[in-house]
Each structure stands twice: as C-alpha cells, then as structure tokens.
Amino acid sequence: MQPVESAEIEGVDYGWVMQTTFVVTILVGAPVVAVLSTFVTLDTWGARAAFAIRVGAPIWFLTAVGTALYAKRAERSGRADAEATDEGGNDRTE
C-alpha cells in the first residue's frame, strides 16, 4: 500500500488538514443539514440542493479553519516539546 501524499508547508501537513476536514464535515455536516431540513419546506430537488449548500458551506468553512488551527497548534506544541529536550533525550526544563 502506497502512503498518502502530504504537503508540509510551515510545518503543517495540509494533506492531513484537507483529509480531516473532508471526513469531519461529512460526519458532522450531514446530520446537521438533515436535522435543519426538517424545519424547512423543500419541494424540489433544486431547493434541496441549494439548502444543503447554504447550510453545508459554513459547516465546511468552520471545520477547515478549526482543523488548520488545530494542526498549527499541534505543530507548535511538538516543536516546543522537541526544543525542551536535548539530543540525549534529557529534559532541559528541570
């Protein structure tokens, strides 16, 4: 099995960010759109698609921003942990 491609820019793996955003948006967004659609009359397929886009786009955007911020914070935290130990693995904070 070949590894998934990754694109690390500024220490953040944006391939992971995109994949995680996709999965979380599906897992969270689909139920939210389904629940919210019960409160709206959607007579045509076009109305249903437009509703899904209007509700799903902000969910996708917030998920993408949250995932990117999480990855950036985790990268900074990992770098700080690496700097806190010397090459022998000894903790420099003591």
Image (spheres, helix red, strand yellow):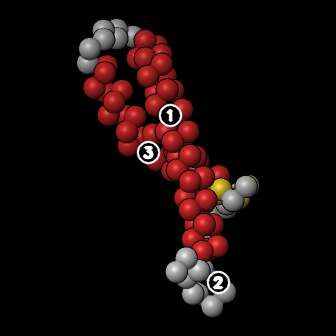
Residue drawn at 49 percent across, 26 percent down: 58
Residue at (64% x, 83% y) in the render: 86
Is 20 on the left-hand or right-hand side of 14? left
Badge 1 vs badge 3, beta-carbon distance below 8 Å? no
- Circle 3 SS class: helix
* Disc 2 versus disc 1: nearer the observer: 2
Residue 94 pos. (x, y %): 52, 80
Q: What residue is shown at x 30% (from left), y 11% (from top)?
A: 40
Residue at image position (65%, 52%) is 14
Establish if 11 lies above or below 61.
Answer: below
Q: Secondary structure at mark 2?
A: loop
- Looking at the rendered image, the quarter that the N terminus falls into is bottom right
| Mark 1, residue position | 62
For badge 2, the amino acid type reads: Asp
Q: Which residue is mark 3?
A: 24
Q: Is residue 77 left or right of residue 9?
A: left
x then y, percent, for residue 84:
60, 74
Cα distance in 3D space between marks 2 and 3: 37 Å
Front-most of residues 39 and 72? 72
Q: For this rendering, which residue is in front, 94 or 79?
A: 94
Sort mark 3 into few (<14), some (14-19) or many (20+) by Cα contacts within 10 Å: some
Q: Is residue 87 above or below residue 68?
A: below
Furthest toward the front, the residue is 94
Count residues near mark 1 (Cα–Cα under 10 Å), then give few for <14, some for 14-19, many for 20+. few
In the displayed structure, does residue 42 sit left or right of residue 18?
left
Is there CB contact under 8 Å for labels 2 and 1?
no
Q: Which residue is mark 2?
A: 86
Dot 1 amino acid type: Leu
Where residue 42 sits, quadrant-wise, is top left
| Circle 3: residue type | Val
Residue 64 visible in the snapshot: yes
